[in-house]
Amino acid sequence: MALGLDIRTVGDMVALPDSLLIFLLPDLPLTLETLKITFPYAATLAVAGLLESMMTASIVDELTDTPSNKNRECMGQGLANIATGFVGGMAGYAMMDQSVINVDAVEQVLH
């Protein structure tokens, strides 16, 4: 900005929302056929996300010498991902590399 360079921003490419999130139900028929199609993908993504999150929690526990409640982590992640789907968001999970970088950064600041 100081040099006056023409750099594109996200706002230049798409219109950014100017309102709060709204609750939406998916526009899909709630039938057994729909569930047969979507369930294998949903279950696979849920298991992959939970495994990554549990590995991340174990590593962060080890690095910080503090215990975490893995059951609480799984429940919170599941509830948050379900709620996110109703407001148009994307599911998420704990990522190992980002968490380790954050733990290292905090330790450097504290020491």
Image (spheres, rainbow, N blue to C red):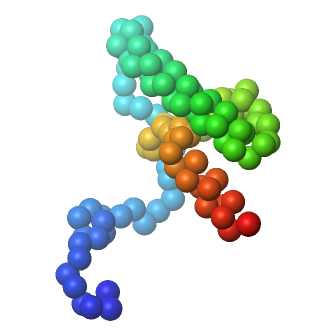
Seen from the viewer's position, the closer of residues 74 and 65 is: 65
**Residue 66 sits above or below residue 4 on the image:** above
Quarter of the picture containing the N terminus is bottom left
User: Residue pushed farthest front?
Assistant: 111
Measured from the top left, where is residue 97 in percent x and y? 50, 45
Which residue occupies 35% across, 64% down? Answer: 16
Q: Which image quadrant is residue 102 in?
A: bottom right
Q: Nearer the viewer, residue 83 or 65?
A: 65
Q: State how many labels appear.
A: 0
Looking at this rendering, what residue extends furthest in the left direction? Answer: 6
83 on left or right of 58:
left
* Residue plotted at (29% across, 70% down): 9
Left or right, 80 with respect to 6, comes to right
Tell me, yes or no, if residue 25 can be seen here: yes
Q: Residue furthest right?
A: 66
Name the residue: 47% across, 62% down.
19
> Considering depth in this image, is 97 or 45 the residue closer to the camera?
97
Occupied quadrant, residue 28: top left
- Camera sees residue 84: no
* Percent of width and height locating residue 74: 66, 29
Quadrant occupied by the C terminus:
bottom right
Tell me the residue at 53%/41% (across/down): 96
Q: Quadrant of residue 73?
A: top right
User: Which is more toward the observer, 101 or 74?
Assistant: 101
Locate residue 110, reporting x and y percent: 74, 66
In the depicted structure, whether residue 33 falls above or below residue 2: above
Left or right: 29 in relation to 54: left
Q: Position of residue 77 (x, y in %)?
A: 61, 35
Location of residue 66 with respect to 74 vertically, above or below:
below
